[in-house]
Image (tube, rainbow, N blue to C red):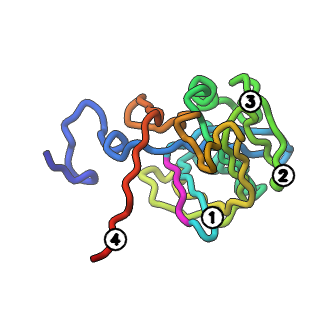
Amino acid sequence: MFYRPAHDPHGLAHNPFKALVAPRPIAWVSTLDADGRANLAPFSFFNAVSEAPQILMFAAYGKKPAEDLNKDTLRNVLETREFVINVAPLALKDAMNASAAPYPAGVDEYERAGLTKAACEIVQPPRVAESPVAFECRFMQRVELPSPDPDYTNGLVLGEVVGIHIDDSVIKDGKIDVKSYKPLARLGYMDYAAITETFSMPRPQAV
């Protein structure tokens, strides 16, 4: 099949776009609001975009002025210019999902999900103590993207990584063993996956 997303119906029961761009890592983003209240929400449009300097990005789509649903995250990042991206392992799938609920502003998702706040070393927002990996980030830039609804804002948040927490239990022979904590990934629809197998391929040499 072929279709033009902005012009043609795809004819399927559900939009296939996010099922086709998969798996996508999950940014479990913790922030503080201007009053110091913690917020925690997952975002599935997330990745690393630069190694030097180390920069992460996640995309946020929410009702203007970013006061709707779990997009408290966006408002908090823009106000405080700090955030933490926690890795969601398979063991915390239910807690991650619980934190995605559209709670009113000010509700503590850590409490609702049964999670523990842990202090960071450089930034003010807490990290998820149970998460094996967390990236402390300072806000760098907001890149506006087109939105199909004028009442909603759409865009990328870029943050420079200023600190990384790694649980010693996931380090084996000097390398990160992702199979030991099985990071979650988002697929399409309501589907998720976890990394349980890996393989290596040496990069070929030019001849």
Quarter of the image with the N terminus in it: top left
Q: Which residue is mark 4?
A: 205
Residue pictured at 41% horizontal, 42% vertical: 23
Q: Quadrant of residue 188?
A: top left
Asked if residue 105 can be seen in this view, the reply is yes
Q: CA distance from mark 3 to mark 2?
A: 19 Å
Kind of residue sitting beneath label 4: Gln
User: Looking at the image, is mark 3 or mark 1 nearer the viewer?
Assistant: 1
Q: Residue 67: x and y, percent?
A: 66, 43
* Among numbered discs 2 and 4, the one appearing first in the sequence: 2
Q: Which residue is mark 3?
A: 110
Question: Badge 3, how many Cα within 10 Å: few under 14, some, many 20+?
Answer: many
Kind of residue sitting beneath label 1: Gln
Queried whether the magenta region covers residue 47, the answer comes back as yes
Q: Residue 82: x and y, percent?
A: 75, 55
Q: Which residues make up the magenta segment?
A: 45-50
User: Looking at the image, is mark 3 or mark 4 nearer the viewer?
Assistant: 4
